[in-house]
Image (cartoon, coloured by chain):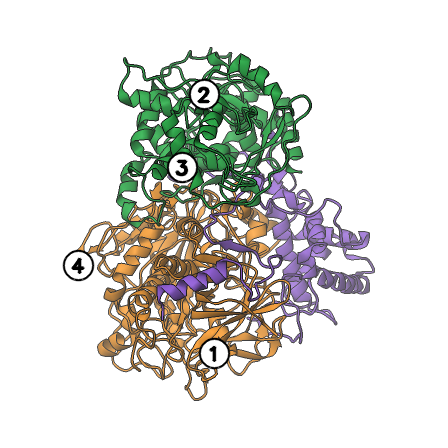
Chain colours: A green, B orange, C purple
Amino acid sequence: MRGFALISAISCMASVTATAPAAQELSSSQVERGRYLTIAGDCEACHTDIENDGLPFAGGRALGTPFGTIYSPNLTPDDATGLGRWTREDFHNALNEGIDDEGQHLYPAMPYPYYTLMSRDETDAIFAYLQSLEPVHAEDPENDLPFPLNIRMSVAGWKLLFFEDETFVPDPDRSEDWNRGRFLVDGPLHCGGCHSGKNLLGASKEDEYLRGGLLENWFAPNIRAGAGGGIAHWETDDIVEFLKHGRAKHTAPMQRMGEVVSISTQHLREEDLRAVATYLKSLEDEIPEVEDAPEAARLETGAGIYFDNCAACHAADQSGVPYFFAPLSTSNKVHAEDPSSAIRIILGGARAQPTDTIPSMLAMPPFSWKLSDAQIADLLTYLRGTGDRRAGPISASQVAEMRDYLAEEEH
Amino acid sequence: MAKQLSGVDVVLVGFGWTGAIYAEKLTDAGLDVLALERGPWRDTTKDFATTFAQDELRYYWRHGMFQEAAQSTVTFRNNSAQTALPMRSWGSFLPGNGVGGSGVHWNGQTYRFLPSDFVAKSHNEERYGPLPEGMTIQDYGVTYEELEPHFDYFEKICGICGKAGNLNGNIVAGGNPFEGPRSDEYPNPPMEMTFSQDRFEAAARNVGLNPFPVPSANMSRAYVNPLGLQLAPCTYCGFCEKHGCGNYSKSSPQTTIIPALMKRPNFALRTDSEVLSIEKSADGSRTTGVTYVDTSGESFFQPADIVVLCAYPLENTRLMLLSQIGEPYDPRSGEGVVGKNYCYQVMSGATVFFDKEYTNGFVGAGALGMAVDDYNGDNFDHSGLGFIGGGYIACYTTNARPIESHPVPDGVPGWGSEWKQAVQANFLKTASVGVHGASMAHRSNYLDLDPTYTDRHGRPLLRMTFDFTLNDRRLSAHLTPVAEEIARGMGGREVVVGERKGSYDSVPYQTTHNTGGTIMGTDPQTSVCNRYCQSWDLPNLFVAGAGLFPQNAGYNPTDTVGALAYWSVDAIISKYLSQPGPLVQA
Amino acid sequence: MFSPTRRKVLKALLFGGTAIAAPSALYAAEYGRGEGMPWSPFRGQPPYYGTVEASFFTPAERGAVAAICARLIPSDDGPGASDADVVTFIDRQMASFYGRGQHWYMQGPFLEGTATQGYQSEHPPAQLYRHALVALDTYCRDAYEAGFAELSEDRQDAVLKGLDEEEITFEKISAKTFFDLILKNTIEGFFADPIYGGNRDMVAWRYIGFPGTRYDYRDFVGHNGARIQLEPVSLMGRPGWSSP
């Protein structure tokens, strides 16, 4: 019995869940509206030093970029170290044009190329919410960037090439739902910040829009849900469940995306998540070319490794247990062109993000001590060559590279 | 000199099944709850992931997750004429340790006690006349009917897989016709059975018995429990009992309660913290909290308004004796209560050896089995038999772990060529039909403090004085032939019968069902706790676990332990909090 | 008594800063307080099976133990303890916490127990082996003018039978206790996962048909008495995981 109706199970449980943050009622209060937009924008995630138990919104989190490390600033209304002296105008300029209260450019690690879609009204609301927080005096560390990037003026050139401030204009030929979805995805949710391919200078490539992107050696997969897209096999309900409850038929949010669901999307209104799903379902893509079948020997060892190690959760026929253990035959991560996430998860393990509705912790153990590079490569090659989707083989050196990177990162 | 800490509403001593149950309910009611666990933190991926959980040597033979005898053990003797000596390494039972306790490595066999089990004394006296001299069984003080909603809830928290046999008084085909009335069906259907169970079922029906699928905490399908926790389908890995489950398919505190509890700001847990004693107020009328020591060796006094003992019957009894709470039991006079009515389980059975067929024991799970209850409790007429009680008879397929399970027929030597070849010829071709017999309390079976041996803190170890009684032997002698008869009907080449012979031997593994010591009842002269599991002596002290059982029934204890915990914590929330004090007038 | 005000105050004291002593954060881990379940990548307790170099026995002791194991589980038309390298398993066990009796309760006084009271020797397993092998050697030289390993197989069997049936006794320690222990350890070494040094190349598992450490047999539940043949796999894999 593999079918499982998560949504109906949740509604039966609704009365017994533990106290969760209050549902997002649309109220006339500016602060409440701003709080909702802040959640959608996931501001708290970057602007809180999560790794070191920092206070919310007080900044100081180290964000690794291909160019160096940037530390997020303090958004609480502290006069000396936060936004205490900022005006609404200053804040709007920051989100809309990427400049701070002194006219200096912000590094686009702050996703203003996306936030620019928000209107003055919306940035005012966010500002009102931030100004309502308890001021925290927190000096944030200096950014660690090499010359000449440590000079903010250098960002001007980048912006000239890659940035244009714009406001969101709804498409009259599309439904209200679709437009709301597009606003959220391209605006506050800034999905493209991770899920779009980047050029060498770190700007999103238009033709790589939501086709997957590499960030801190995690591959955020292709999230186009229309025909030919990475998650074409996901229904609207699947996308909503994933974002709201942290559990869906096909997979669960983990690691970085787990953080996003936990801090941001699980608290959004269901109709907004449905709008996001509607928008994503409209994005089509080209079905990637089917790769040639890999060598038989690798398929054989891969199959053996798979059955002996993985079947306990992912089932002998790769169909998993929907909502519990990801079906692998259709998995977006396993079949992604860039296998970084799949390799990384096999080596280090992964955990399905516990959310307010489903607090269970299902975790995949690390296999780094048990399987060699060649074995992991054969295993992935087998999965990529025999599922319902096709992707090319993996080499042992790709696994070795990731293993080295992770070993360094640990220390 | 113990450092004093800031107080909490509730301290739980030990954090296994009952600790998790009390913690979840009390934090849900808004109280600040602190659990102190002697052992380490345990969770699935860190301690028993699918990558290394299948390790018979580590987890069974080297006691990977059990209590370390070096840290605390018990001394044992069969009777008062002997000198009790330490169980230097565990044998017949394996107490748990660490977060989740034995709830991590149990089989998952989840039966409710019968309605008559809760009134064993009055029921049997009424039907059969006066009890034999020395048998000290008692009524629980709570009835099956009162516990029924709590059995139901615990089974839903665990996702137990089975088939109801008695739904609200209506006997339903496919279930156990002898069970007490259930208000609801099991939350999940029974497990899919294997060859051995099919043979047992046919053979049992053939001799006029009523086989039913064993209620199992190994999941027959994916399940989400009332707290939002997910349990995955069991994969019949054959590494169930004594091992942790790597793929979330066995009910345990970790899979059913703890992740929900960890999100509550009013719950805290300290591991590697061993409680040394329960402290009392100067006038001795209430407990003020507990003293514990952590791995630095430093001791702390943790004040609390309520203390609940969740440390397993053996340690609970020992803590009460060490802290001088309640009158210790004296077997000579029969007076006193703490340590009284220690019971165990009376096991026997028959092994079937097949010729052509393979039973493939490695395709197994801890509670994968079929059972008959026709000879349990008072389900059959005991007139003239000279004993009371009974047990279920079941055919489980739990494992084929070779160090543990390598049966050979009668007459084969214990080592050498012939032995080795017999092992090989019969491996994967045997099934066992086991009797899980009740253990009635007797005045000579009890727990107290050892006069000689101490733990590393210098505190006396618990001393266990226990042997099988005449009732046990007669019960076993009556039921074992039934098991044999069924076994002979299963189509094997030969059957080897393992009778319950001789004294209780503390060495070979039997069950980890140690009951009694802190028994519940209606009279403070003959019990430690009242019917709400509240200490008669200290009204803000509650006791959990099978130590509450005045005698042990012919079933595994966990379902009844869970039901009593939910029953008791419900009384704390609905009655005690608004009016602290004794809930029952003595 | 349980007014909300009082509970709030307690909460602040417990979970906020406090002037009253707090337990050391170093020596007892604390969990809960709304922080959720701990998790980080690479967390896990993979089996610790000692180093390959761990060793307790002298060469002579090792020789005697190997000879004993070879009679307890002989190599005949099927593999035995020698093929499975059981002596290496036992040697590494004796060098580990098990041999030291580290997890056992080894406080005195040590008295002779009844048949139902289990192991009561003052010697943890490694020391018991050491003393017993000396006593065994003495016995064999007295009776046959050769060490145990040099005796014929028949003679070795006779000696072992004598230990088992308590016809041969040792002065300072119980010969029967030693026999029971070495039989137990031999069976362990024969059938345990190969990572512990015995059951070399899973030879014992292959001999009896045990498939090892696989974790999913859902497709086999309906076997209905038919044989299931699977190449055994251990915790560190099997040859089939690598291309030749």
**Residue at image mark 2:** A222
Q: Are marks 3 and 1 on the same chain?
A: no
The residue closer to the viewer here, A182 or B95, is A182
Q: Quadrant of residue A38?
A: top left
The answer to whether any part of residue B293 appears in the image is yes
The residue wearing badge 3 is A128
Q: Which mark is residue B488?
A: none
Whole-angstrom CA distance, mark 2 to mark 4, is: 57 Å
- Of the image marks 1 and 4, the number of the one nearer the N terminus: 4
Return the x and y of residue B152 as percentages of the image width and height.
28, 56
The chain ID associated with circle 2 is A
Q: Is residue B368 left or right of residue B52?
A: left
* Residue displayed at 46% across by 82% down: B328
Residue B362, image x, y percentages: 47, 44
CA distance separating discs 4 and 3: 63 Å
Which residue does the image show at 60% across and 57% down from the upper left? Answer: C25
Q: Nearer the viewer, mark 3 or mark 1?
A: 3
Q: Is residue B233 above or below residue A336?
A: below
Q: Position of residue B18 (x, y in %)?
A: 41, 61
**Res A322 visible:** no
Q: Name the residue under label 4.
A: B169
Same chain for the residues under marks 1 and 2 in the image: no
Q: Write the residue at 75% across / 51% down.
A: C55
Parent chain of label 4: B
Tell which tag, 4 or 3, sits nearer the viewer.
3
What secondary structure is found at the residue carrying circle 1? strand
Q: Mark 3 lies on which chain?
A: A
Q: What residue type is labelled 2?
A: Asn
Q: Please give the chain letter of the residue carrying mark 1.
A: B
Question: Of the residues shown, which amino acid type is indicated by label 4?
Answer: Gly
Disc 3 to disc 1, C-alpha distance: 54 Å
Between A182 and B456, the one lying in front of the other is A182
